[in-house]
Image (cartoon, rainbow, N blue to C red):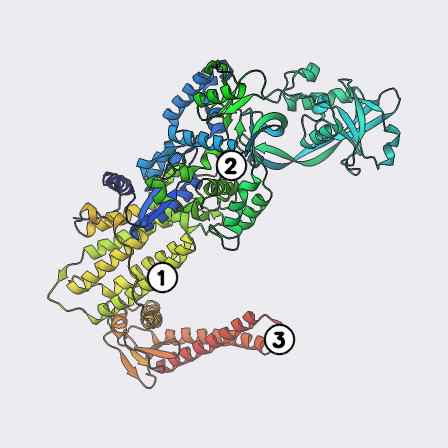
Amino acid sequence: MQMPSKYDANQVENKWYDYWMKHNYFHSEPDEREPYTIVIPPPNVTGVLHMGHMLNNTIQDVLIRRARLLGKNACWVPGTDHASIATEAKVVAKLKEQGINKSDLTREEFLKHAWDWTHEYGGVILQQLKKLGCSCDWDRTKFTLDDDMSEAVIKVFVDLYEKGLIYRGFRMVNWDPEAKTTLSDEEVIYEERQGNLYYLQYKIDGSPDTLTIATTRPETIFGDTAICINPNDDRFSHLRGKKAIVPICNRVVPIIEDEYVDMEFGTGCLKVTPAHDENDKNLGDKHSLEVIDIFNEDASLNSYGLHYEGKDRFVVRKEIVKELEENGFLIKTESHLNKVGTSERTKAVIEPRLSDQWFLKMEELAKPATQAVLGENPEINLYPKKFENTYRHWMENIRDWNISRQLIWGQQIPAYYYGDGKDHFVVAETIEQALEKAKKATNNQALTTKDLRQDTDALDTWFSSWLWPISVFDGIRNPENKDINYYYPTNDLVTGPDILFFWVARMIIAGYEYKGEKPFNNVYLTGLVRDKQRRKMSKQLGNSPDALKLIEEYSADGVRVGLLLSSAAGNDLLFDESLCQQGKGFGTKIWNAFRLVDGWEVSKAIDQPESSKMAIAWYESKFQKALLEIEDHFSKYRLSDALMTIYKLIFDDFCGWFLEMIKPGYQQPIDAKTLKSVIAIFEDNLKIIHPFMPFLTEDIWHYMKERTPEEALIISKWPVAKPINETLITEFEFVSEVISGIRSIRKEKNIPFKDVIGFSVLNKENSNTNFDSIIKKLGNLDGINYVSEAIEGALTFRVKSSEYFIPMAGSIDVDSEIKKLTEELQYTEGFLKSVQNKLSNERFVNNAPDQVVASEKKKEADALAKIDTIKASLDSLK
């Protein structure tokens, strides 16, 4: 099959992806082979491909493709997450465009719109991953709201409730006023923001006295139900037992005492708003204070806000400051830097809010998961190890998990209320089971399903994804099915450190609770993708390139290589688009290398030259040594280092040296024995680079010869380790310097490469002559002579302690050459003198670091050797 002169990535990528899909190479079923399993970190169903996804999924595909080549039964399970908050927000926004308010719809009506939206826009990212070359088992694609997945989530909720681990509680929670739902502590991002500290004056009831408090949130005075002072603060002893009057709303509140108050902060007097601050709530409980909630669910003020009712909290802050000042209540304002909690999803400022929520007790559940990673004999390895400290911090400070969300999109909490009030309920997997439980609880057999009301809240999205490695194999509903028994525990998890607790730790907890063992063996934590200025890539900054356009411009293989060349394990990736160009260029290099080989005529009538025999022996050892390095890098999840080893091997050793060594003369055929070895070597090269560059390698693989689907590269065998001849590798390092010396002289003296020249060696080291045939070929020499003394009238260069002499060509201008060498000698002698002066200075030698002194001594030795070589060249010219 004739190769085209240029590689057309767009045509090739579509062709081979369709071919892989047609022949079902990505699909896995349990068999007698060793399984290798990865479950994808499910991207949001609302998502589109970005640089973080590109890095994460390229790494996973490299691992899964290599596992296939190693003969393992590779299974990469794809899927998407329903992303309650993000998806519901998008559906609400779309409805708003159509003039529809969510509040006007029934639950069923809203869910229909949500499903319509999901079917229309959801899962786009999975199609985009195919463009990157991801070899997922698409037949196993899961969605966290699939019926079977939801059934598993509900089953787990009921089980944990019946174990006494899930409970309902009235607690201070993090409220997202934009999404109108509670969030767990881990979904709140704290940011330092510049704000103000407002000093407000409160009158004392029945007295001309006043007190001053400092607050960052003057709008919350409508919820004040006490003023608190420290009992040890003598400044306020006159206020004990008295009452204060809250400005504007004129509520009379008690002045209480508690050592919680920091006497050094602000004025030493604290306004207590139990409904809107967790610490204030604790004080309120302790002192039996009234709780007044002043906010609506969107953080606008309710009727307690008087004339500010219906206005947003930040609008009210500006307006109430003005009113307080006009009425003499605002004493002064100071700048104040404080931490503000924001929603990870919507970026809205979080409101502390008292609410009935569902919680999961975490302390006992977390213990096996803590030991699994941090115990004396850990079962799960984190790469890099530095993230163990982050894991330890989360697990040792774990709090009960708020698992309920005030959303419709998601698994509806399986709690069913009967009778009056919120305290009469049962928890069951179905309404029919709930009815039986309710009849038993009430001793009322006349109850029907119409008497039950299901909780309207949905479960936190993470409460479904924490089951992911189990539920994708149906291990909750059918705990002993063949898939879960074969594929679980999975092998490697590749994800970002930002969800080490949200997802990774929780999956480990679920794994031990529901399977009695770890969910995976290793966790590879990638870095964040940043631009060259170290800024995190984001749409807002406009520094995130379009992932699909990158693929279109540089090819999927080029982008994959570019991403991994800049991504050391666990460190942030400083993305530079030029690396994708380098990746594309590497692909072109490999393509052209095979075009060169493919274009040679072959003859069975000629013998294999000695130079080709030595070249093959050298490269095979070089390849085997690189293979050991690659295996070591993979074992430590240093994929960038593995790729760099392959890159140097193919670019420098194979293309730069090996092909030159075995290349036949101009318009001459290559011997059959050499070509057979070259093809076998090329095939091994393609195998080790295939996980990184799947499209290009598969294409070249099929140009090599006609192959059946059973012989495709994607399912071929990883190269087998063989003995390494270290001597050949070491000798060639020396030989390559000799060849470079010859080429440098040719370039400097302008000796055309077509001109064959003589060559002699003053062999002080008794150099091995194994590679003389290669030196002759690559140096275009007519022969190599070993001599016992210097040759006059020859050009000279030195490699280590051996001198090499090339007879002068008649075209060389002797006078100008002597002048040039004399100038170089004078410069080198001056440089040597400056170095020796430094080394003769005792102060320098005694005080400088060892490596600095060693560096200077090496400079001295190099200069002395160079002077000898120049003098020898001058002597030969005189």
Residue 247: horizontal and vertical position, in percent? 78, 20
Q: Secondary structure at mark 3?
A: helix
Q: How many marks?
A: 3
Seen in the picture, residue 672 relative to 186 is either above or below; the reply is: below
Q: Mark 2 and mark 1: span between their CA atoms? A: 42 Å
Label ID, residue 846: 3
Note whether residue 681 is visible. yes
Quarter of the figure that contains the C terminus = bottom left
Classify residue 819 as left or right of residue 184.
left
The residue labelled by disc 2 is 541
Residue most extreme to the left: 605
Seen in the picture, residue 129 relative to 729 is either above or below; the reply is: above
Lower sequence index among marks 3 and 2: 2
Q: Mark 3 and mark 1: span between their CA atoms? A: 42 Å
Residue 344: horizontal and vertical position, in percent? 54, 34
Mark 3–mark 1 CB contact (< 8 Å): no
Name the residue nearer the viewer: 424 or 724: 424
Quarter residue 322 falls in: top right
Mark 2–mark 1 CB contact (< 8 Å): no
Mark 3–mark 2 CB contact (< 8 Å): no
The residue labelled by disc 1 is 628
Q: Secondary structure at mark 2?
A: loop
Lower sequence index among marks 2 and 1: 2
Residue drawn at x 56%, y 50% as measured from the top left = 389
Name the residue nearer the viewer: 418 or 370: 418
Classify residue 528 as left or right of residue 128.
right
Near mark 3 (Cα within 10 A), the count class, few <14, some 14-19 or many ≥20, is few
Note whether residue 461 is visible. no
Q: In the image, which is nearer the foreground, mark 2 or mark 1?
A: 1
Which three-letter amino acid code belongs to the residue tagged 2? Answer: Leu
Which three-letter amino acid code belongs to the residue tagged 3? Answer: Asn
